[in-house]
Amino acid sequence: MSKSQSNWIDLRSDTVTRPSPAMRAAMQAADLGDDVYGDDPSVNRLQDYAADLFGYEAALFAPSGTQSNLLALLSHCGRGDEYIAGQEAHTYKYEGGGAAVLGSIQPQPLQNQADGTIALEDIAAAIKPDDFHFARSRLLALENTIGGKVLPMEYTRAATSLAHQRGLATHLDGARICNAIVKLGISPREAVRGFDSVSVCLSKGLGAPVGSVLCGDKSLIAQARRWRKMLGGGMRQAGGLAAAAQYALEHNVARLAEDHAHAERLAHGLRQIELLKVQTPQTNIVYADMPAAACAGLDGLLREHGILARVTPHMRMVTHLDVSAADIDKVLTVFQTFFNTWNAPTSEGAA
Ligand SMILES: *Cc1c(COP(=O)(O)O)cnc(C)c1O
């Protein structure tokens, strides 16, 4: 990793963080064993810690959030079963169709409302009766946060009890559940109440280099462990990674509030620019709409100033522990400089 590369202000995602010196020290000091034999003390410690933190019987360390979600889908559902998820859900839209490809599990995607929820009526209507014409509705999978939005707790309670009443299990893609926990000021256990399983990413805002944990009851986690091995996710001396994840859970949850404040600072500054339409962020993700013709030029100027972002007409910027308030101010200055002189291409002297 070159020095110049690590100096980029990187707003593409909260996955880009690098382990801090203290996290690296924890990784270095980790006790190791073969985790496929269940022998890695650092992995075991992390799994016990995560299970207790979120209030489940057991937990399993997985190499990625995609695999952790897939383990949950494969463990809850069998061939010919169906899971209900939002059209915008990561499990449906951004995981390569893994549940269908590898598990013969049919997704039943439903429209996400503007606040990220799926209407309860839509869920109720999509649950299929026991009839051999239909796939067996088996699981409701929600995501929190979704697109940076926090699901209201009354909603997750209502949705999970509806699912349970109708005989479905419930899974939460909690890749960013800690952002919701900090935003709402609630406990991890409260945030996941009603879900039979939760997948939590340690490598997003929490700052670990790699890994997710899946939490659930013992029999679900035992099945997930089988699937993890089959998928090639059985790692051997994985304790160094688990130690980073452990460090992340112990030290980097409360500080997510800083990322949320930085997102607000960014949104506030961007809102001063007339050509931008900026959504009010709830957590660490800021969306700004801008003219498509401005994107290439803005991207170029941002790069000139050492700022990496995915510049699109519906632009997403993500704050994280490697982005400071001063970085946000620098980003804002570049945006302001660019839009002060930018003219739409139809006018004379287009940039
Ligand atoms: C990032 C993400 C995942 C997947 O995590 P990876 O570690 O990138 O595979 C799953 N769900 C949501 C909501 C995410 O944001």
Image (cartoon, grey):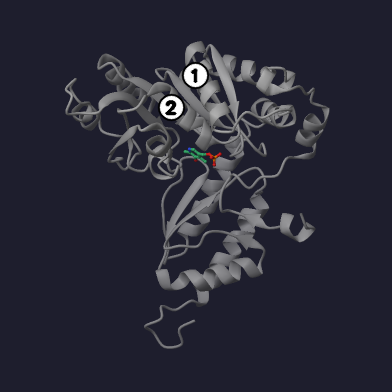
- Say whether residue 2 is visible: yes
> Percent x, y for residue 166?
25, 17
Q: Quadrant of the N terminus?
A: bottom right
Q: Nearer the viewer, residue 91 or 226?
A: 226
User: Crowdedness of circle 1 by 10 Å Cα count: few (<14), some, many (20+)?
Assistant: some
**Residue drawn at (51%, 26%) of the image:** 227
**Residue drawn at (36%, 33%) of the image:** 104
Asked whether, in this view, residue 131 is left or right of residue 324, the answer is left
Mark 1 = which residue? 223
Residue 106 is drawn in which quadrant? top left
Give residue 49's mark: none
User: Quick check: 46 above or below 289?
Assistant: above
Residue type indicated by callout 2: Leu
> Percent x, y for residue 83?
33, 30
- Say whether residue 187 is visible: no
User: Quick check: 289 above or below 341?
Assistant: above
Do tag 1 and tag 2 residues touch (Cβ < 8 Å)?
Answer: yes
Mark 2 = which residue? 74
Q: Nearer the viewer, residue 333 or 297?
A: 297
Residue 49 is drawn in which quadrant? top right
Where disc 1 sits, the SS reads helix
Q: Nearer the viewer, residue 221 or 79?
A: 79
